[in-house]
Image (cartoon, rainbow, N blue to C red):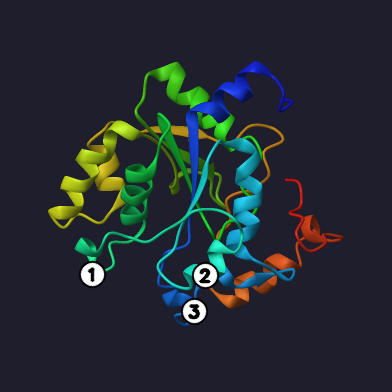
Amino acid sequence: MPEHTHSTLHARADLTGLVLAGGQGSRMGGVDKGLQLLHNQPLALHAAQRLAPQVGPLLISANRHHSHYAAWGYPVLADDVAWSDFAGPLAGFATGLAHCTTPWLLTVPCDSPLFPLDLAQRMLACATQHGASLVLAAAPDAQGVLRPQPTFALLQRALLPSLQTFLDQGGRKIGAWAAQHNRLLCAFDQPGDASQAFCNLNTLEELQQLEQLPAWHGATSGVSPTL
């Protein structure tokens, strides 16, 4: 749908975007995953540039190398020190919600640079249609089974107290917390939806393999392919 339509403008006004780049990168040898290069550009910057046109304000969740992330011009948030045991993506969710000034927060991970260009529009449409306060993206796996993509989450700002309580009690799994709110799945399995849209990069080998995808052929620095 063209960006100038009423529905998209409404979605952007209601949404704050959050790029999750605060992980430990353990399966990449402990490196800062968001700063690993894909076609000469950091993964997290690919994600930020892909998400920015879909939302209003854009935030970055990062726990290391703040100056690197801040140089891109977006506010950079660190996880609350109360969860110093590394609380995972939920800590990023909570920090984003605490700084969110719009009714909704849309999160994306830094290691999935090919997520849909209409992610925000479709997630918000699902929430509006079903009256849901928490929506997770879902996509088919290699066998065609629809699987939740839990770090692609649309959250009402009002969920913050519930999430803080869950974290304070030691909860760390997105699925367990989401189940408390009857989470809704937004399926990205329609004709024309790219099979690689939600691929995530856990190792440096997977990053190198992604560079070889046809979608990236001809891509230039600073420009993500259209999928």
- The answer to the question of whether label 3 and label 1 lie on touching residues, with beta carbons closer than 8 A, is no
Q: Identify which amino acid the numbered label 1 is placed on.
A: Asp
Label 3 environment density (alpha carbons within 10 Å; few <14, some 14–19, many ≥20): some
Q: Which residue is at a point 52% across and 70% down the rendered structure image?
A: 67
User: Closest to the observer: 176 or 45?
Assistant: 45
SS at circle 3: loop
User: Closest to the observer: 59 or 21?
Assistant: 59
Q: CA distance from mark 3 to mark 2?
A: 16 Å
- Most extreme residue toward the bottom is 29
- The answer to the question of whether label 1 and label 2 lie on touching residues, with beta carbons closer than 8 A, is no
How many badges with numbers are in the image? 3
Identify the residue under disc 3.
31
Give the left or right position of residue 211, taking residue 159 as reference.
Answer: right
Q: Tag on residue 85?
A: 1
Q: CA distance from mark 3 to mark 1?
A: 18 Å
Q: Which residue is at a point 48% across and 38% down the rendered structure image?
A: 16
- Percent from the top left, x then y, of residue 7? 61, 19
Q: Which residue is at a point 61% across and 77% down the rendered structure image?
A: 205
Give the left or right position of residue 158, taking residue 130 as reference.
Answer: left
**On-image quarter of the C terminus:** top right
Identify the residue under disc 2.
67
Q: Nearer the viewer, mark 3 or mark 2?
A: 2
- Percent from the top left, x then y, of residue 192? 72, 35
